[in-house]
Image (tube, helix red, strand yellow):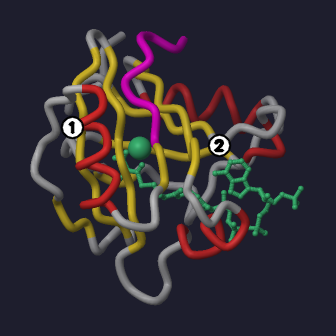
Amino acid sequence: MIGRLHHIGIAVPDIAAASALYRTRLGADIGEPKDLPEHGVTVAFIEAGSASLELLSPLGPDSTLHRFLERHPQGGQHHLCFEVPDIEAAMARLKADGATVLGDGAPRLGAHGLPVIFMHPKDFAGTLVELQQASLEPQS
Ligand SMILES: CC[C@@H](C(=O)O)C(=O)SCCNC(=O)CCNC(=O)[C@H](O)C(C)(C)COP(=O)(O)OP(=O)(O)OC[C@H]1O[C@@H](n2cnc3c(N)ncnc32)[C@H](O)[C@@H]1OP(=O)(O)O
Ligand SMILES: [Co+2]
């Protein structure tokens, strides 16, 4: 079911400071930060071969990242995002296996304008897993 690892989400308290670190210390090529109010985050992507890093900082008082950063004040690895060909089929399989799809249980458009869902860390041995449909139309 899962395809390539699309990105690793890394939550940081200050996305400008974190971007400067990756840029100066690792020579990373970082995209401009982008506010995604519908997700309560500001993101900046770092290309890293076949996958990317997604730097995330809280946007707005209700961002879920505030709780994460209370536990991890310096920031840290937040989630893994895998590509799937058909997110509805993936959701059906996960729900049938007892996994909890977070939010209202329906896919939403993520940072790349593609449908994404999240599964609770309790269902994946402590890791927050995001699935992203590889293209706008599901593939069989
Ligand atoms: C940019 C858009 C999109 C993309 O296109 O890529 C994104 O990536 S947006 C990323 C931000 N959005 C989300 O993360 C949405 C899904 N997340 C959630 O719904 C919540 O964060 C959560 C997973 C339900 C946790 O919410 P929280 O308020 O922190 O709940 P608790 O404090 O009760 O924690 C419950 C439990 O889960 C552990 N936890 C929380 N976050 C993580 C995490 N990132 N990785 C692993 N574990 C996590 C937390 O420690 C608690 O554990 P216990 O104490 O053992 O119960
Ligand atoms: Co993500």
Label 2, secondary structure: give it: loop
For image coordinates 36% across by 10% down, the residue present is 140
| Location of residue 40 with respect to 77 vertically, above or below | below
Give the camera-side residue of 8 and 38: 8
Give the magenta-colored segment's residue range.
Answer: 1-9
Is 113 within the magenta? no
Q: Residue 30: give x, y in percent of width and height.
A: 16, 39
Cβ of mark 2 under 8 A from ligand 1:
yes
> Which amino acid is tagged 2?
Leu
Q: Mark 1: few, some, or many residues within 10 Å (few <14, many ≥20)?
A: some
For image coordinates 64% across by 49% down, the residue present is 101
Q: Nearer the viewer, mark 1 or mark 2?
A: 1
Q: Earlier in the sequence, mark 1 or mark 2?
A: 1
> Which amino acid is tagged 1?
Arg
Left/right of residue 119 with respect to residue 83 in the rendered view: right
For image coordinates 37% across by 23% down, the residue present is 6
| Location of residue 90 with respect to 55 vertically, above or below | above
Label 1, secondary structure: give it: helix
Left/right of residue 28 with respect to residue 4 in the rendered view: left
Is 5 within the magenta? yes
For image coordinates 65% across by 44% down, the residue present is 119
Q: Residue 33: give x, y in percent of width and height.
A: 17, 57
For ligand 1, which image quadrant applies?
bottom right
User: Residue 1 appears in which quarter of the rendering?
Assistant: top right
Give the camera-side residue of 2 and 92: 2
Per the model, the C-alpha gap separating discs 1 and 2 is: 26 Å
Check disc 1 and report the residue beneath it. 23
Cβ of mark 1 under 8 A from ligand 1:
no
Q: Residue 19: give x, y in percent of width and height.
A: 26, 48
Check disc 2 and report the residue beneath it. 128
